Amino acid sequence: MIPSTLDRPEEPFARASKGWDIQKLYTDLANAKKEFAPHTRRGLTPVEKRHLCGLLCGYSPAEIAVFLNKQIKGVEVDLSKTLYRYIELLTNRPRNALKNWRDAIDWLEIAGYKTQPKTSTGAILKATLHHSDRILSAAISPDGQFLATGSEDSTVKIWS
């Protein structure tokens, strides 16, 4: 018997593994799950992994539901009862603090699970310093306390 794509947790969201440390995230979220719900099955389920990969690809719960041919409300409920709670524990947030799926992505990125692109230094700085385009220049203050960046997006930002 040939397994369907839904038997592989990362499908149809395989590109999540290209921008995220997915194996470490699976492991750490499984540990958070064990802390949150010690009576449940160990490790993340294939459904939890698929939902996580969908979020990491930037899809909303409604879009994930469409991809997986599921009811939107069902995916929303699954996320709010499982992954959102594990992400809160993993990122040291208060219980029920995660209300918007976009916050999950931001919190995991801040926690260091997003991998840096294998491109030029400017692209890495762009991702790290939140410019919308390439960084063209950077300067550190004489006391080393501040960094100024100038971007092709016509902005200059000061960082402490």
Image: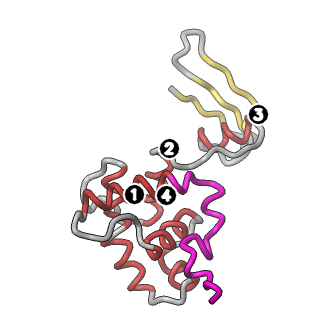
**Going by the image, does 74 lie left or right of 152?**
left
- First along the sequence among labels 4 and 1: 1
Residue 122 position within the rendered picture, expressed as x and y whole percent measured from the top left: 74, 37
Q: Residue at x 42, y 72 (%)?
A: 45
Q: Which of 90 and 123 lies nearest the eye of the viewer?
A: 90
Residue 157 position within the rendered picture, expressed as x and y whole percent measured from the top left: 60, 33
Q: Is mark 1 on a helix, strand or loop?
A: helix
Q: How crowded is mark 4: few (under 14 residues within 10 Å), some or many (20 or more)?
A: some
Q: Which of 153 and 87 lies nearest the eye of the viewer?
A: 87
- For label 4, the residue is 105
Residue 115 position within the rendered picture, expressed as x and y whole percent measured from the top left: 60, 47
Q: Which residue is drawn at 55% across and 85% down?
A: 66
- First along the sequence among labels 2 and 4: 4
Q: In this view, does 73 lie above or below 118?
A: below
Residues in magenta, as a range:
1-23
| Quadrant into which the N terminus falls | bottom right
- First along the sequence among labels 3 and 4: 4
- For label 2, the residue is 112
Residue 10 shown in magenta: yes
Q: Residue at x 50, y 44 (%)?
A: 112
- For label 1, the residue is 29
Helix, strand or loop for the magenta stretch, by majority: loop
Q: How crowded is mark 2: few (under 14 residues within 10 Å), some or many (20 or more)?
A: few
Nearer the camera: disc 3 or disc 4? 4
Instruction: Tell whether label 1 touches label 2 (CB within 8 Å).
Output: no
Report the disc number at residue 74.
none
- First along the sequence among labels 2 and 1: 1
Outermost top residue: 142
